[in-house]
Amino acid sequence: MDKIVLLKMAYSILEKVTPTRLDCGKLCDKACCQGEDEDTGMILYPGEEKLLASQSDWLIINDLEGLGPLKKLAVCKKPCPRSMRPLACRVFPLTPYLTEDDILLVKIDPRARGMCPLARTMDKKELDPNFIRAVRKAINLVAKNHEIRAYIYFLSRMLDEYEKQPYFV
């Protein structure tokens, strides 16, 4: 199925859910929305730059060099319209993960530990179950596209390497 159609459907699934029943941005002063520089942001799913290209008043889309199917990075210049958040923002602090045996999972993103209090324990029990269900549904949907599935596989191997690194508090 067309990746743009799938991404729009995923956006819709995730439109009204958040990681907690309360505004989790109050826990960390919206740390995940604070772009420190042009290299800090959220990696876009394949094709997502087409959906966000018209958002130049609040968003910069940078090219990523040498990261396989991870080609674009969204960097916020100012607060975004929630309805236009990239998919990685909508699922944060979760991430899709494709095992070596091609099993698609959703897990706490280990890269979120440094900024997200909800990710520090690496326990999904702290998240709203409705959010987790919506993320699973959205990720299973977009993973039907072979290009997005390849992206998730590559991202998963990158996360495997990331998790091998020591974590310091």
Image (cartoon, helix red, strand yellow):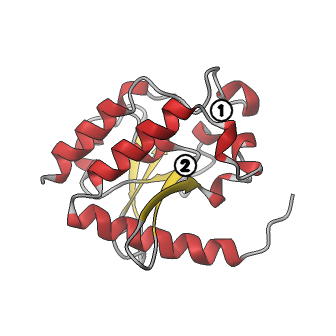
Tag nearer the camera, 1 or 2: 2
Q: Is residue 44 left or right of residue 3?
A: right
Q: Position of residue 42 (x, y in %)?
A: 49, 51
Numbered disc 2: secondary structure: strand
Disc on res. 1: none
Camera sees residue 106: yes
Q: Residue at x 59, y 44 (%)?
A: 35
Vertical arrangement, residue 51 with respect to residue 30, above or below: below
Q: Amino acid at mark 2?
A: Leu
Tell me which amino acid carries mark 1: Lys
Q: Is residue 76 visible?
A: no
- Work out which residue is located at the far right of the displayed protein and give it: 169
Quadrant of the snapshot with the N terminus = bottom left
The percent position of residue 87, horizontal first and vertical second, equals 39, 44
Quadrant where the C terminus lies?
Answer: bottom right
From what the image shows, is residue 148 above or below residue 101?
above
Image disc number at residue 30: 1
For image coordinates 30% across by 65% down, the residue present is 149
Q: Judge the density around disc 1: few (<14), some (14-19), many (≥20) Cα neighbours within 10 Å.
A: some
41 versus 154 height, above or below: above
Q: Bin the neighbour count of mark 2 within 10 Å (Cα to Cα): few under 14, some 14-19, many 20 and up.
A: many
Q: Residue furthest left?
A: 1
Residue 7 lies in quadrant: top left
Residue in the picture at 72% in, 30% down: 29
The reply to whether callout 1 and callout 2 are in contact (CB within 8 Å) is no
In depth, the one of 45 and 145 nearer the eye is 145
Residue with the mark numbered 2: 94
The image quarter in which residue 146 lies: bottom left
